[in-house]
Image (spheres, rainbow, N blue to C red):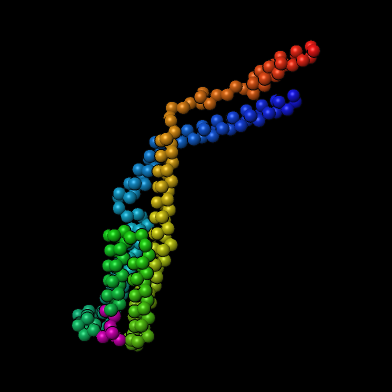
Amino acid sequence: MNHLPEDMENALTGSQSSHASLRNVHSINPTQLMARIESYEGREKKGISDVRRTFCLFVTFDLLFVTLLWIIELNVNGGIENTLEKEVMQYDYYSSYFDIFLLAVFRFKVLILAYAVCRLRHWWAIALTTAVTSAFLLAKVILSKLFSQGAFGYVLPIISFILAWIETWFLDFKVLPQEAEEENRLLIVQDASERAALIPGGLSDGQFYSPPESEAGSEEAEEKQDSEKPLLEL
């Protein structure tokens, strides 16, 4: 008899906890979930993500910066017209900087086509451009005579090499992981919205009402006493 109130208390406590969990489920606001879904879908509809746009801007900066350095090199070595004719029309692999400029154009075209136009979500395009750039620059530095032509013999190859690897790092550690995380968030929000839609709405706290513990305990105690009276009389 002493254990009966404790059992009833445990049962009531479990019932109240289950009711609280149901209230938490119904506290999900489908309007807020749909707003979040629309915000994520709006980002997809407006075009590329912000981090991908930053990557494309950096690729453009790569091309413009190498072009600027090459134009400065043309001016330093005797004027743009004369040096341009010498490096382009009379191209020499061992002494010309024109191929380094073409290498920057190659990186720009491949990366913009892959990650801005086609919106590729893989690293193979950046791996291709970085591998080609690294191999070409290493071979040119070893075989050419750039170091004998002044500071630009060092600056242009080193800058091109560094920019190519910065692009690789930025895409692999910033662009692709953040876009994958945004996509996972969208899937989670959509799943939560679908589950909330399956739960019937319009439920109030009154539907989860349970009698107070004291009243339930007193009723059970009275019923128990009434059932034990005939045994005591015997």
User: Taking 28 as reference, is 107 left or right?
Assistant: left
Front residue (pair 50, 150): 50
Q: Which residue lies furthest to the front in this view?
A: 234
Identify the image quadrant of the C terminus.
top right
Magenta stretch secondary structure, dominant: loop
Front residue (pair 154, 43): 43
Q: In this view, does 187 lie above or below 55?
A: above
User: Is residue 215 in view?
Assistant: yes
Q: Position of residue 203 (x, y in %)?
A: 46, 27
Is residue 94 on the magenta stretch?
A: yes
> Residue placed at 75% from the left, 13% from the top?
230
* Residue 21 sits in quarter: top right
Total numbered labels: 0
Q: Where is residue 216 in the image (x, y as percent from the top left)?
A: 64, 21
Q: In this view, does 117 lie above or below 183?
A: below
Front residue (pair 61, 174): 174
Q: Position of residue 131 (x, y in %)?
A: 37, 74
User: Is residue 72 in view?
Assistant: no
Q: Residue furthest top?
A: 233
User: Taking 37 as reference, is 74 left or right?
Assistant: left
Q: Is residue 203 above or below residue 35?
A: above
Identify the image quadrant of the N terminus.
top right
Q: Position of residue 104 (x, y in %)?
A: 30, 72
Is residue 14 on the magenta stretch?
A: no
> Residue placed at 43% from the left, 36% from the top?
196
> Residue placed at 51% from the left, 35% from the top?
24
Q: Give the range drawn in magenta.
A: 92-98
